[in-house]
Amino acid sequence: MDTTNLELAAQRYRDAEAALDAARKDLQAEALAALGQTDERGAQATVARITGWSREYIRKLVKKADSDS
């Protein structure tokens, strides 16, 4: 059985997962930084609109970041 294409596809998948994980961490950090720079009303709603995340997810992200620091 020739598994060359399967091995290449598996490697591309692992690379894409790693890139997605890194992008998610970057986006979370940028969202937290944006929220940390302002106390403007509606900031969470703006971050939610831009990221596509729910406001509940953003609140949990902020709470986790606060408890980690």
Image: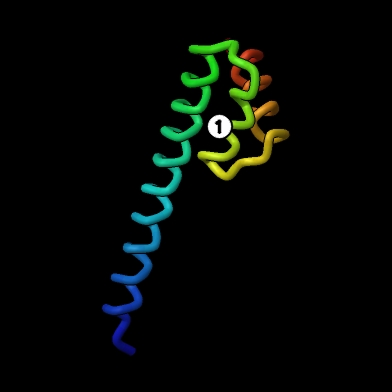
Label 1 Cα neighbours within 10 Å, binned few <14 / some 14-19 / many ≥20: some
Say which element carries label 1. helix
Q: What residue sits 57% from the left and 40% below the top? A: 49
Q: What residue sits 68% from the left and 20% below the top? A: 63
Which residue matches tag 1? 47
Residue 15 vs residue 66, the one in the foreground: 66
Q: Which residue is most to the right?
A: 56
Residue 64 vs residue 5, the one in the foreground: 64
- Is 30 situated above or below 13? above
Which color mode does the image show? rainbow
**Left or right, residue 55 beside residue 8:** right
Name the spot of residue 37 as percent of width and height, x first: 49, 12
**Left or right, residue 16 beside residue 4:** right
Q: Which residue is most to the front?
A: 41
Q: Quadrant of residue 5?
A: bottom left
Q: Quadrant of the N terminus?
A: bottom left
Q: Quadrant of the C terminus?
A: top right
Q: Quadrant of residue 55?
A: top right
Name the spot of residue 9 as percent of width and height, x first: 34, 71
Residue 22 vs residue 56, the one in the foreground: 56
Q: What residue sits 47% from the left and 40% below the top? A: 24
Residue 17 vs residue 11, the one in the foreground: 17
- Is 29 situated above or below 57? above
Q: What residue sits 59% from the left and 14% below the top? A: 40
- Is 32 situated above or below 36? below
Q: Amino acid at mark 1?
A: Val
